[in-house]
Amino acid sequence: YLLGINGLMLGAAFAFTHRYGLAGNLGRFILAHGFVELSVICLSVAAGTYVGEAIIRPAGRTRSAAFAAAVGDMAPLLTLCALLLVGCGLIEGYLSPDTTFPIAARLVLGICWWLVMVGLLLGPRKPGSDAPLRL
């Protein structure tokens, strides 16, 4: 629900700014931090769904034990998400409002910050390992 509402709010903001010829400015503003911010929102929704699923279907455990286990599983992911959002906040606070920061540099920064996020999510892997990804 909240993921859908977030999408509706972003779409409404773009529709409103487009109506007044400012959609390009909004796009430039979110370009450097938007990739990671939106990805983190989706990851957080997935983590919340995982915890909620553990409460609904505890799989032979008590609900509190299933909840505690699910929170323990998701804690590293959510800690990483919080740190990534701090980086997004710094970008949004200092670079996004700077009108002298070129759009190409914003795009490169946004993609590089997203690649950092992906690299942190994948974590170190042993060469030739086919083990599933774990945080």
Image (cartoon, rainbow, N blue to C red):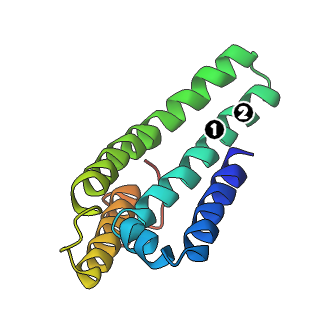
Disc 2, SS: helix
x then y, percent, for residue 64: 68, 15
Is residue 64 positioned above or below 73 on the image?
above
Identify which amino acid the numbered label 2 is placed on.
Gly
Label 1, on which residue? 48
Instruction: Give the side of residue 44 with respect to residue 27, left or right.
Output: right
Q: Are marks 1 and 2 in contact (CB under 8 Å)?
A: yes
In the picture, the disc for residue 52 is: 2
Q: Is residue 132 visible?
A: no
Q: Is residue 81 visible?
A: yes
Instruction: Give the side of residue 59 with respect to residue 40, left or right.
Output: right
* Residue nearest the observer in this picture, 59 or 33: 33
Identify which amino acid the numbered label 1 is placed on.
Gly
Q: Residue at x 69, y 58 (%)?
A: 8
x then y, percent, for residue 59: 79, 29
Instruction: Give the side of residue 55 with respect to residue 135, left or right.
Output: right
Q: Count the numbered circles shown.
A: 2
Q: Residue at x 38, y 74 (%)?
A: 28
* Residue nearest the observer in this picture, 25 or 95: 25
x then y, percent, for residue 25: 41, 73
Q: Residue at x 57, y 76 (%)?
A: 18
Q: Quadrant of residue 12?
A: bottom right
Disc 1, SS: helix
Q: Quadrant of residue 80?
A: top left
